[in-house]
Amino acid sequence: MSSFGTIFRVTTYGESHCQSVGCIVDGVPPGMTLSEKDIQPQLSRRRPGQSKLSTPRNEKDKVHIQSGIENEKTLGTPIAMLIKNEDQRPNDYSEMKLYPRPSHADFTYSEKYGIRSSSGGGRASARETIGRVAAGAIAEKFLKQVDPKIEIVAFTSQIGEVKMNRDPFNPDFQNLLNTITRDKVDSIGFIRCPDLNIAGDMVKEIEKYRGQQDSIGGVVTCVVRNIPTGLGEPCFDKLEALLAHAMLSIPASKGFEIGSGFVGVSVPGSKHNDLFYYDEEKKRLRTKTNNSGGIQGGISNGENIYFSVAFKSTATISQEQHTATYDGKNGILAAKGRHDPAVTPRAVPIVEAMTALVLADALLIQKSREYGRSVVH
Amino acid sequence: MSSFGTIFRVTTYGESHCQSVGCIVDGVPPGMTLSEKDIQPQLSRRRPGQSKLSTPRNEKDKVHIQSGIENEKTLGTPIAMLIKNEDQRPNDYSEMKLYPRPSHADFTYSEKYGIRSSSGGGRASARETIGRVAAGAIAEKFLKQVDPKIEIVAFTSQIGEVKMNRDPFNPDFQNLLNTITRDKVDSIGFIRCPDLNIAGDMVKEIEKYRGQQDSIGGVVTCVVRNIPTGLGEPCFDKLEALLAHAMLSIPASKGFEIGSGFVGVSVPGSKHNDLFYYDEEKKRLRTKTNNSGGIQGGISNGENIYFSVAFKSTATISQEQHTATYDGKNGILAAKGRHDPAVTPRAVPIVEAMTALVLADALLIQKSREYGRSVVH
Amino acid sequence: MSSFGTIFRVTTYGESHCQSVGCIVDGVPPGMTLSEKDIQPQLSRRRPGQSKLSTPRNEKDKVHIQSGIENEKTLGTPIAMLIKNEDQRPNDYSEMKLYPRPSHADFTYSEKYGIRSSSGGGRASARETIGRVAAGAIAEKFLKQVDPKIEIVAFTSQIGEVKMNRDPFNPDFQNLLNTITRDKVDSIGFIRCPDLNIAGDMVKEIEKYRGQQDSIGGVVTCVVRNIPTGLGEPCFDKLEALLAHAMLSIPASKGFEIGSGFVGVSVPGSKHNDLFYYDEEKKRLRTKTNNSGGIQGGISNGENIYFSVAFKSTATISQEQHTATYDGKNGILAAKGRHDPAVTPRAVPIVEAMTALVLADALLIQKSREYGRSVVH
Amino acid sequence: MSSFGTIFRVTTYGESHCQSVGCIVDGVPPGMTLSEKDIQPQLSRRRPGQSKLSTPRNEKDKVHIQSGIENEKTLGTPIAMLIKNEDQRPNDYSEMKLYPRPSHADFTYSEKYGIRSSSGGGRASARETIGRVAAGAIAEKFLKQVDPKIEIVAFTSQIGEVKMNRDPFNPDFQNLLNTITRDKVDSIGFIRCPDLNIAGDMVKEIEKYRGQQDSIGGVVTCVVRNIPTGLGEPCFDKLEALLAHAMLSIPASKGFEIGSGFVGVSVPGSKHNDLFYYDEEKKRLRTKTNNSGGIQGGISNGENIYFSVAFKSTATISQEQHTATYDGKNGILAAKGRHDPAVTPRAVPIVEAMTALVLADALLIQKSREYGRSVVH
């Protein structure tokens, strides 16, 4: 459904061609300094039209806080936010009344709901993610107040065949995870790959597919630094299970791997196991390596949490496709309008937002656990 | 926490060294013929000790239904099931009082709960999965009554470096997904790889690591055939998000990919998109290819749902490991006892169980949606 | 928190002095004809200022649908609705910065959230109920499409000492429950008591307390007719438990009784038990009496569901009260502005809305149960 | 369904004639000293057969903890408990195969589930409450560790026409609420009324109806002392809403009122409002009166929480009843066996258990809120 989280919970609404999109964020701690200025930056990072690489739809995506805040302080009550839909151009979607777009959600929404919205796939629209990003910005601001050293940084690690080395057993990759910042990610432009050379190749890869009226997928990698130990609720709400749930709920995502992921399955335990040592500074055990990706047994161990999310190529392309109409007649569909040949870079703030939502909720639940524990000991 | 599902919901309990493990399954449709004979087979497939490849702990794992059934018919009330813990050998775990096992849950459970169970990681034990498998057997029996053609078949597709070709764009792989049966999977022995040659290599791979007192990971691939269209609840409870949640909640899992997964990100939309055609037999649109893995926009489209789950190498190994005690002193840990060098084949029925739980719940919710839709049209 | 329901779920937001109040309604069946015209009537019934009996704050409370609807048809996606806050007069609340209003939520909100909104009690405001009423109007429209004979009618059965005879063993009362309509309730004016004589006395009762700058409580009784059998989810989500939860979540409510309620405890089983007979028309068992109030064992039995909800006297009064400031200093508080001396009549549409929300959700869940049952038999 | 609570959550199972009844309690704080000795007393208070006033079924109801505890310390993992069903006498229920018992759940269970258990109403059995009481004992032990002064005491305040004065504006009643203890309640025997004279009349009232093979209802009043401020989650999960939900989920309950309840509706605000004063000892505001019943705006204010729950007369009576069979034929039912003429006194520990479950969960959630608040200020 449209709600996510237990104690810190977002509920989103809105599709492409309605009045507005937005969300209600419930459970935000009271007394937090918060205004639209805290939320707009991630919304702006999410929106298209910032460079020639993405769709020219010029959405302004200005957030309007409706409730839950007075004098820039949160009240502890639900914070509703809305972002108006402005540049709708419903005419561009005319053929979609005849054809379900291949690999889009048009057909399945029609099967599930028995009705077709003018945009085809109802909420299976990039605009649906606006509510997530707005809510995630609040979650992240809260996490920063828990510890300013908590950082959530996502970046584009692959576009098509062009990929960074993200082998978890590669020290350079681990070093990157230790040091990458959001500023660094943005400094290279909208592609959001922190390696200048690879970023250039990624841009070329996207341009190649754009020239062919085609599209291409990619991978977003995300790291969380300085998160406390103890987050995650075994057995079914292990922290990696919540992260996987969150990531696979993002449109177009097809895969999730944490820590050593799919590469790690062929590494024997003797090499894969993260051995312990005592960290004098943190006054607790830490691990010499971090193939676990910061989570063991479903619970954070205080090391970097890192994971990657696969995004398939955009379904809507202008190339002709030999497909069938809703009525079952064979025909040729070529989507009108200009379409984003690669949504992966725009997924970066969405991955960050969903990560922040998972962690804020897990942290608040764990603090309740810690309280209980402190009482009974 | 320990519950999973909304309308069809399982709650599990139990760790290695307590009286019993088990679960309560709530929301099972009433009037279903059900007895322990329906549940025991998957429990027996899950249990170790069936071949030289797995641990010799000879758990009998006999299920005892406590409630919710009279005269072998379900009542619609919660079905509680318990399986006694018999072969506990707590002495084998003696060093674990000193050392948190590297990459196991001992340290994180200690951090989260502030107490250490005798088995170290509390519920981060293979025995925790018994309740899942028992509940999944009921979910699967229900799905079979919805349509006997619904099939959930998982198999070992990789052990260490030995892997089947699971490229989704490979017709042989898609053909395998169309035809593989649970009988076929079991016919080749406990390794549960349906390719005889590769299965042999997998066994050798495991033996190699066993000989080195080491362990190795693997991948389980699962296919669901003949599931109806319309399952999954956008936006946050997309069907793939629920499956990812379910799979990443299984102990030792590190990754999930559905349909084209991580491979698909480098395939352009023009090739990746699943074009439609009209299926005269099913009287609805189907797709010529199935790179989406049976789910589009978070909703099942009626094609095969297939996905893979990565399992890391077993954390508990008998090799010496240079690590640290809970108290922060450097030392050497070599786990006593005999340990499973590769849990992947045993994960096969667990993956099937979690899949059945996700689908039974999603199906029941969708039937409520369909009812609502039928009323208002 | 701010969400209610499982399959048909509302999430509300907003307090007195923010931009807007409203809600997101998730799980509304798709294809339903719906527009603002369906929602406005109950909102208008809820709003104050309609007669001299209630507060003169002239809220217009016009609903703006944001999403989930195209061409007046629901899409199955979340329906967001907002109602602007217009007539805010924050100055009226100036003393409340010093004094927590006795028996209002000012003190407890301050204790829980550690921050004070300008209106004192945050969401403990009559305006919070707008989102409930808007959502309830959608739920009710859905129920009407399930069966046009389903009716939810609430009315004022007591104001102060003036009360209708609502003894469940009184045939006149049962007859009233069988026949009362919303039109009849509204025909007697804003007091919403269907007995003309008693209504007049109730108005006098309110005027008496208004004249004394005081306030008075009351009781709302509600009946639901023609609801199907089978609704409610034992054991913890019995239908009466969900109704009680819903009713006690309405501001100022202090009690709930269903069927024979508190009166029935002194009636022996031989008289209290509802004996069965066969109804040729409905082709099923019915009960000769209905002391159970339409629910037995937590499940609807097809008879009228009826219950009463107690509302205390309004906390905010203009009379001087000898109380203490937040800082603990004794002093005298006399609330400025004009305050509603009796909110009970305005609670009528709120009780109806919460009832509709409970029933729409319970019905959709039960339809999922019935599907499961039909499959396995 | 069969689960209750968010962070501290119980899931129950079992009906009259199955192997066992019990529950899984998830979210119990780790490190708490706990054994069956902590749970058995409330189970024994709940069980029938302790005096001539209740049914002679001699259930032993011995609890067996299955998991979640080692060396009498909780692990933080789910605690499963089972209590065997021993004295089942299914033959006593033979006519119930023909007749749905009037005002019992036999008919509605049959309608909902389409199957009839041998005991008729499935889980609508007094034995269903065993799991609640076992879980409540753990919740209460936790609350006692939070503050040993927290006390939850319920008592029988009415049987049939015999009632204690529970007018909330009566100082004697408020004084009773301030001082009543569980020992005092039990000292007067199984009737559990703390007023010796009234208790005697209550016993006579029950004996009168027993002599007539009839039954009678009653009221249980409960007080909670020394609970912290801040508990409850507006708007839908107000503390009184959760309590109402919990109480109306107990079999045979028909009403709930908190604080001034139904009596209070006719008391004007000027008398009803609880004025504030500063309590030097507690260093916070308190109220001079407590007509609110310890909750304002859905949040605890630190005063006594008190409420009453109405229980109807037992449905199963041995008197002849002119009713109809499931098949719709008129006939006479006289229930065989010995039946409890008044369950109200046995409801006392059940009310306490459900109260403890609500409060433990609300407290743990509030501690998470307080943490969030402390961070952002």
Image (tube, coloured by chain):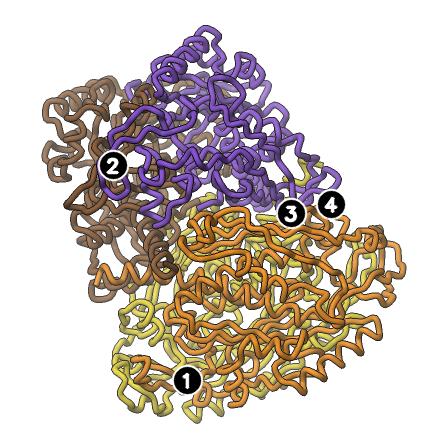
Chain colours: A orange, B yellow, C purple, D brown
Q: Mark 2 — residue? A: C324
Disc 3/disc 2 C-alpha distance (Å): 49 Å
| Marks 1,3: beta carbons within 8 A | no
Q: Amino acid at mark 4?
A: Ile
Disc 4/disc 3 C-alpha distance (Å): 11 Å
Residue B358, above or below C182: below
Numbered disc in front, either 3 or 2? 2
Q: Residue at x 46, y 35 (%)?
A: D109
Same chain under badges 1 and 4? The reply is yes
Of pointers 3 and 2, the one earlier in the residue sequence: 3
Q: Amino acid at mark 3?
A: Thr
Q: Position of residue C221 (x, y in %)?
A: 44, 21
Classify mark 3: helix, strand or loop.
loop
**Mark drawn on residue A274:** 1
Q: Amino acid at mark 1?
A: Asp
| Marks 1,4: beta carbons within 8 A | no
Q: Residue at x 25, y 52 (%)?
A: D138
Q: Position of residue C331 (x, y in %)?
A: 24, 33
Tell me if A180 is positioned left or right of C219 in this view. Answer: right
Classify mark 1: helix, strand or loop.
loop
Chain of the residue that carries numbered disc 1 in the rendered image: A
Residue B344, above or below D47: below
**Mark drawn on residue C77:** 3
Residue D223 in view here: no
**Mark drawn on residue A115:** 4
